[in-house]
Amino acid sequence: MRNRLVAIAGWSAGRPWLAIVGWFVFVALCLGVGAGIGGRDAATEDFRIGEAGRGEALAASGGLQQRAVERVLITDRGARLDGAAERAAQEISARMRALPEVESVAAPVYSADGTALRVDVTMTGSELDGDKHVGALRAQTDEVQRANPGLLIEETGGPSVSSGVDALRGRDLARTEMIALPVTLITLLLVFRSVAMALVPVLLAVSSIAAAIGLSVVASHVFPDNGIGTNIILLIGMAVGVDYTLFYLKRAREEKARSGGVPGARALVELAAATSGRAVVVSGLAVVISTATLYLADDVIFSSIATAAILVTLVSMVSSLTALPALLTVLTERADRRAARKSAGYARAHRESSNGGRFTAFVLRQIAAKPAAGLLVSVLTMLALTAPLLGLELTDMGRETHPRIIPAMQTFDRLNAAFPELKSMHQVVVAADPARAGEVTSALRALAERAATDPALTGAAELRTSADGRVSLLELPAPHHVSDAAATASLDRVRADYIPATIGALPDIDYAVTGDVARYADYPAHQKAKLPLIIGALLLVTFALTVVAFRSVLLGVLGVLLNLLSAGASLGLLTLVFQNSWAENLLDFTSTGSIGSRVPLLLFVILFGLSMDYQVFVLSRIKEAVDDGVPTRRAVLDGIGASAGVVTSAAFVMVTVFASFIPLHILEMKQMGFALAAAVLLDAFIIRIVILPAALLLLGERTWWPVRPVAATAGRAPVKVS
């Protein structure tokens, strides 16, 4: 691999402008092809999970699937309504019926106390398409509001909430870019003391993100996009893109300083390719392979996330191995023309990279003196941070958890207060021979009678049958939000008690319970069932990759254990902060007493991949020294000391990117940003500077079992450098 990377770097260095132009042509082609082909959004059927998903499929086979529903709420600031509200409702109904986006409009319904009136509007098309066309409906509601200033006329529903969430997410992400980019640039300016050098990582990261977005559009025809792929590309792309470029550039500057500025531009990039280039490839492959385990979740959301992360990582690797050597060549040649002024800078860079900073040097001296004590204290600290994970509660984030800064959510609260039966529902779906429609109807009515006595299922049940009589659907309103324990308990009773005594007693039928609560409950259960498989695969591939890269079984085991510590501690902190209310004001959120069901699995996989970045980079420096005949103890201290500066800089950039997601309003994204930022901090400052050197010092020469490295002079193939 090393000589192939040197050859690629040499080609780019020999034709720098061709390589640079070629890279940006590639980026433009990716964007152009993506725009020309167009993407494929995930369809409703792609999201079906568990019994709830099976019930949705049964309902859809009879044309009884859920539709996008908007609800217009008419109130008079708490007063009982009069004829003006009736007339407004009639006008709303007439306007909505005239829209091509509307399939039907239900008769107006008063609240129990007569202070609210609602009009239910069912939209055409699939449930997921509602947010794309809801603007036309909201425009009609606004017109009626302007014509009736004495009333409060507002609209909410799944489409309104979804479009509001998307708009809020877009504004939030724009704000994170305004935070992350300047901080990243400032950090890189401090690292390189050169505007040109600082701009290179950002330029390549941004262009890699653009290319990955274009490629993700093409990939969506195989792995449908669930709407957050671009968010993942931005999140991962800026982090790994800057990291890979930073590793490469810092190594090039070290080599320049070490040789007193003697190597030419091409020789310099070839030296960097032979060392950090290999680390970039191994790190990138670790992220790709780790993230690919998300496909085992059998879930369109995780498939979309995996595809986005894999694409942006691969593209970032390619940019670091092709465009970066060319840019470095151009910058080096320019610097060589001003060599006298730059020589002091090169020497300073060498000194800084060699000693790793006073803090790192101090910590390493303490670890070298007492490695066992350092290892014990640091591991116990990480385990203490992991402890809250034992109380982890996973839930799917229901609609009621969305921030109230979204206007549709404020209306959502008022609607549910006036009509509590709309909070959630159960749907019992039965498919049977049409000749048995009467038998099925009788059983479903018997089920409705049993449910009528359940205090958690108050409200009028509704029974519908498909036109061919084959599929029947019973809706049972539940006056509790899907995240309430009462809603989940009522689902358990429907499935475990009411179904077996009624529908379950009929032979040769197919049935399932779906609906809002079932969707909410079945998704976390599905994730928990897949978790052992994914974690097992993740541990296996991480172990195998480390063993192959460093030819050491013990390093493979150590790498897995360190990644487990890092991921466990960050998830423990996440649980401690977000499952409790003590940090609500500090981080601007309302605790649900749980963590989003997608968050731990996603974080676990991504953290394993990103942890390999630092692990591979640090271990590569140590292995280089050992291969050159340096004793393992000296190689560990020198390698970690020499790499500490770049690891710290890279970690600071990553933390900035991830922490910029903490102010977001969407709770799951806030949780992800917090946990990722915490994990990088722990990984860079405890795992790599304390635990890793302590463990390696205790292992000594046993670190490389079963293949003991030999000095380069004793047989390692030299790297051909022009």
Image (cartoon, rainbow, N blue to C red):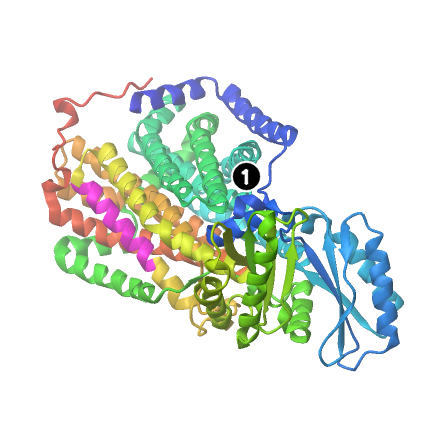
Secondary structure at badge 1 equals: loop
Residue at the (25%, 40%) spot, across then down? 543
- Say whether residue 580 is magenta: no
Rendering coords of residue 340 (x, y %) = 41, 31
Residue under pointer 1: 224
Using the image, determine if residue 79 lies above or below residue 126.
Answer: below
Q: Nearer the viewer, residue 717 or 412?
A: 412
Quarter of the figure with the N terminus: top left
Q: Which residues are magenta?
A: 554-569
Residue at the (42%, 52%) spot, across then down? 526
Using the image, determine if residue 510 lies above or below residue 722.
Answer: below
Q: Nearer the viewer, residue 43 or 390?
A: 43
- Say whether residue 563 is magenta: yes
Quarter of the figure with the C terminus: top left
Rendering coords of residue 230 (x, y %) = 55, 43
Query: How dense is the environment of label 1, judged by Cα within 10 Å: few (below 14), some, or many (20 and up)?
Result: many
Q: How many marks?
A: 1
Overall secondary structure of the magenta section: helix
From the viewer's perspective, tell me whether residue 326 is left or right of residue 644: right
Rendering coords of residue 161 (x, y %) = 65, 59
